[in-house]
Amino acid sequence: MKILITGGAGFIGSAIAKKLMDRGDDVVIIDNFNEYYDPQLKHDRINIFLDGYDFELYEGDIQDVDFCGSMFKKEKIDKIIHLAAMAGVRNSLKDPMLYEEVNVMGTIVLLDLSVKHKIKNFVYASSSSVYGNNKKVPFSEEDRVDTPISPYAATKRADELIAHVYSHIYGLKTTGLRYFTVYGPWGRPDMALFLFTKNILENKPINVNNHGEMSRNFTYIDDIVSGTITALDADLDYEIMNIGGDKEESLMRFIKVIEKNLGKKAKKNMRPMQPGDVPSTVADISKLRKLGWKPTTKIDDGIKNFIDWYKGYFKVNN
Ligand SMILES: NC(=O)c1ccc[n+]([C@@H]2O[C@H](COP(=O)([O-])OP(=O)(O)OC[C@H]3O[C@@H](n4cnc5c(N)ncnc54)[C@H](O)[C@@H]3O)[C@@H](O)[C@H]2O)c1
């Protein structure tokens, strides 16, 4: 199989690329190496994390129809994992138009080309943020999700709706995966685990939102990779599925595990809830479980793996 991964220099995309190549698939990556966070980390995922692997890399924008069209013509792609997006809830409040363009228009460009080139399965990243302030827990795919509370969440919901159009009208198989707070080695610098680790090591305070009254279904990167590949292999007609860890963890315990692994206490700046953020995300993962997938990594192990990676990558001695 030849699999196109959009956003393949990203945190999740690079990890999926490695796993697919390990099992013998051919991989093509598109990424524009934008500066939402340090592009050096993206280049290092390609050059260090994926060192020794053989894949095609296309540097460019998913909104560029000509660029994407010529890549599709050249590569004869079988299936797609579409991850390229502007991520980050808070940043989407600053630049909602960019989020709309990349996350919605970019997705339509790829859906359109997928129909034209008879792609066998189109798996794409949605997000737990589509649940907004959903009161019912755990969050189920059956719950209504028409009250997003950030531009980012609204674009991810829009992707699910437009994917339905393409499945319905053109018979394109699409599966949207609602990822729940992903963490692990080679992770994103704008996310809590990275920020907390960095600040604790540099003796700077960490921002604890909603005075610590937060919980998340943190999901380890390897579990996200196996869940995404399960959906890729399943070739379902039209689906939306949660992928989350199997345990709701409080933010304060999350911080405790980081402190334990760093052997150092955090200076905590307790602050109110931030706009666009939600106090709790809890996933009902029974749908994806029925396909044989289950999350296996506990945060104690996952955080340790992240901190080992962080210290190695940034050459931290203590
Ligand atoms: N990490 C999480 O906790 C999480 C949770 C829910 C959903 N998601 C979604 O999963 C996907 C991957 O997230 P990630 O954490 O790996 O983020 P990431 O930012 O590390 O990866 C996204 C990649 O897409 C690329 N990209 C962005 N805009 C592009 C464009 N216009 N053209 C080409 N490439 C472009 C970026 O350069 C980046 O390398 C995203 O769609 C994100 O919204 C992530």
Image (tube, helix red, strand yellow):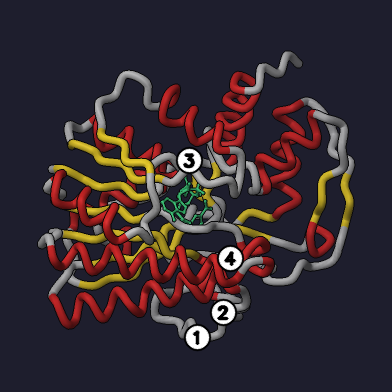
Residue bearing the label numbered 4: 281
User: Which residue is the site of mark 1?
Assistant: 146
Q: Is residue 143 visible?
A: yes
Instruction: Identify the element where label 4 is drawn.
Output: loop
Which of the marked residues, 2 or 4, is nearer the chain's N terminus? Answer: 2
Of the residues tagged 1 and 3, which is closer to the observer? 1
First along the sequence among labels 4 and 1? 1
Q: Residues within 10 Å of mark 3 (few under 14, many from 20)?
A: some
x and y, in percent, of residue 124 in the image: 34, 60
Element under disc 3: loop
Circle 4 or circle 1, nearest the eye:
1
Whole-number angstrom distance, CA of label 4 to CA of label 1: 16 Å
Going by the image, does 266 lie left or right of 157?
right
CA distance for labels 1 and 3: 32 Å
Check disc 2 and give the amino acid type. Answer: Pro
- Mark number for residue 148? 2
**Residue 15 image offset from top left, x and y in percent:** 39, 37
Residue occupied by mark 3: 297
Mark 4 vs mark 3: in front: 4
